Amino acid sequence: MTGTDLFIADLHLSEATPASMRAFTAFMTGPARHARRLFILGDLFEYWAGDDDLDAPLNRAVCTLLRDAHQDGLETSFLAGNRDFLIGADFCRAAHVTLATEPLRITVGDTPALLMHGDALCTDDTDYQTFRAQVRAPAWQAAFLAKPLAERKAIIEGVRAHSERGKQNKPAQIMDVNPGAVADTFRQHGVSLLIHGHTHRPATHRHTVDGLACTRWVLSDWHGSAPYLQSRDGVLSREELLPA
């Protein structure tokens, strides 16, 4: 066991992305097996219709990989993304992961840090924020999960198609984080390090908030390889696993 923590986001695993599933398998049987903690910051799946879909082959395979790594000593925490916010207790039990509440405060080395999926920072996209508030409401989720699984999947496919069409008419900057929301997050939580995904724009940003130097790491999305952020004894670095 080392003092290594790993951070990933936006894998968007599905039957339609076998290369990314192979990359996840290589990641979970490689770097993750030698780490202390793994933080999945949302959108592990392309979509999640409910924990009653656990027996789908890909979903079961993902749970098995996470469970096996846990048995080898890995502690995994999951934060919901905008695609898999319906992941619940049954998935977490099957995968042996902890369902965390956003934002999640941790320590990276000696530095207090905040983990988020990142969509809550995209406040310029007001239509999306309205939708986000609706689908994160417990009453909405309970009503949605009461529908048959096949109906839920059909609804999700329709929402996804509508969302993709809508993106074509939105300026790119609207779908990125709002600088004021980022500054408010640093200020509210009293941290100088923020790690998130969602935007699919991997970069390391430097901010000054009320005179304090702050750093924001944006994680990469996956396209057949396994890009991840690594903290080895508190030193952050970007790594990428290229499956054979």
Image: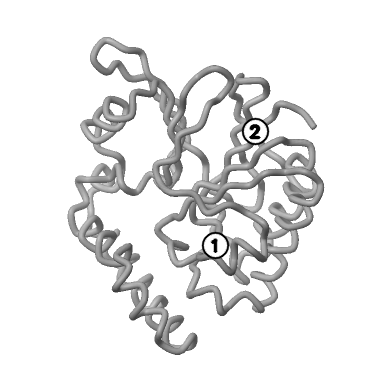
Specify few, some or many for label 1: CA neighbours under 10 Å numbering under 14, 14-19, or 20 or more.
many
N-terminal of the two: label 2 or label 1? 2
> Is 131 positioned to the left or the right of 145 in the image?
left
- In front of the other: 118 or 200: 118
The residue depicted at 38 percent of the width and 23 percent of the height is: 191
Image quarter hosting the N terminus:
top right
From the top left corner, tell me how far across and down residue 200 is, in percent.
44, 45
The quadrant holding residue 193 is: top left
Q: Does 110 sit left or right of 19 as displayed?
A: left
Say what amino acid the circle numbered 2 marks.
Asp
The mark tally for this picture is: 2
Residue 121 shown left or right of residue 71 in the figure: left
Q: Which of these two is toward me, 18 or 42?
A: 42
Which colour assignment does the render follow? one colour
Residue at the top extreme, as displayed? 211
**59 versus 8 height, above or below:** below
Q: Quadrant of residue 167?
A: bottom left
Name the residue located 72 percent from the left edge and 43 percent from the top edge.
74
In the image, which disc is placed on residue 5?
2
Please tell me how crowded label 2 is: few (under 14), some (14-19), or many (20+) other residues with Cα within 10 Å.
many
Residues at discs 2 and 1 in contact (Cβ within 8 Å): no
From the image, state whether disc 2 or disc 1 is nearer to you. 2
Q: Which residue is mark 1?
A: 45
Q: Name which residue type carries label 1.
A: Phe
Q: CA distance from mark 2 to mark 1?
A: 21 Å
Residue found 80% across the figure and 49% down from its top: 29
Q: Is residue 186 above or below residue 242?
A: above
The quarter of the displayed image where residue 230 is located: top right
Say what secondary structure mark 1 lies in.
Answer: loop
What's the mark number on residue 178? none
